Amino acid sequence: MELIGDLIRKTGEPSLLAIEAAKAARGFEIGKDSGLFCVPRVVNFDAETGVLDFEHFSGLVTLLDLAVRRDGRLAGLLEKAGRALAVVHETLTLPESMKHGLPPEWTGPSDENAFIHGDFACINVCFHETSGELVLVDWSAAPLVGRMPTFGSRYFDILLFISSLFHGAPCREVLSWEAADMSRAFLEGYRKAAPHVKLTRLKAYASMICRLQRRNVLQLARRRRPLTAAGYLCCQMLMHARLWSFLHKHEF
């Protein structure tokens, strides 16, 4: 991904970028209609060369950045992020040809399945300092599930976000990182916007999101120098235990 003038340009496999372009374009409309969030506009997609251009939003900060700063606006933005995701799950649609399922273990009953954002992590939910808007970016599925899936249990998006709040903890702040409180604010927003969704099912998927994140943590550790990797793994093991405890002990 690179900045080209006033555009953000992504290059890659055309079939994957076509899905991302379609999801982002639909997300743009959902955000405009709901008033809950913005999505950078798709400016151009070249299916032959695999080039996808988005408008560039200057002044974006991620919710993880705000958490590190302990920004006073964070709780309200997390609640709004929950409402935004619920609206995405209720209204996002794609052509049948772009309906690609998550791995089977992430497929639930028909009333639980939805078209998903796919990489709804706290680094892809941003705040635009200039306008005060929530901005959702990166509508391709997470590498953890292969970037192709567009459909499956809504709990994948929900749990990926919660997991990202725990595993995004900076090592220096791991003992004081308030991931549980942040997760509760997010879940409260989702519950408000989709009261028919019984969040008790989150526990049923706890082991699966933990397994995905363990794999991700190990991959990230391998890219670090040995001493740095050791410190990173210690931090992540602690946060992993806290995530497991939150998902199994919290009353949803």
Image (tube, rainbow, N blue to C red):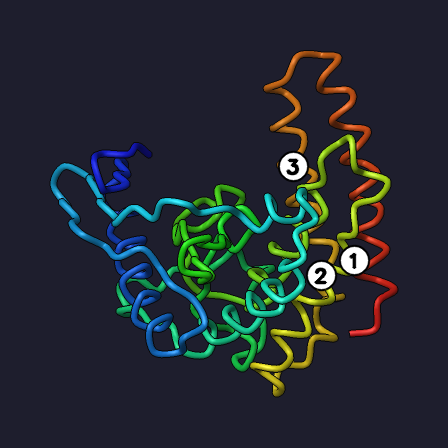
Task: Please tell me which residue is depicted at 84% across the width and 67% down the height of the picture.
Answer: 250
SS at mark 2 in the image: helix
Whole-Å distance between the Cαs marked 1 and 2?
5 Å
Q: Disc 1, disc 2: CB below 8 Å?
A: yes
Whole-Å distance between the Cαs marked 1 and 3?
22 Å
Among numbered discs 1 and 3, the one appearing first in the sequence: 1
In the rendered view, tell whether residue 152 sits above or below residue 226.
below
Q: Disc 1, disc 3: CB below 8 Å?
A: no
Task: Please tell me which residue is depicted at 44% across the width and 54% down the height of the picture.
Answer: 128
- The residue singled out by tag 3 in the image is 215
Task: Please tell me which residue is depicted at 81% across the width and 36% down the height of the picture.
Answer: 237
In the rendered view, tell whether residue 85 sits above or below residue 147.
below
Q: Is residue 8 left or right of residue 122?
A: left
SS at mark 3 in the image: helix
Question: Is the residue marked by circle 1 packed among few (<14), some (14-19), or many (20+) residues within 10 Å?
Answer: some
Residue lying at the far top in this picture: please name it: 226
- The residue singled out by tag 2 in the image is 183
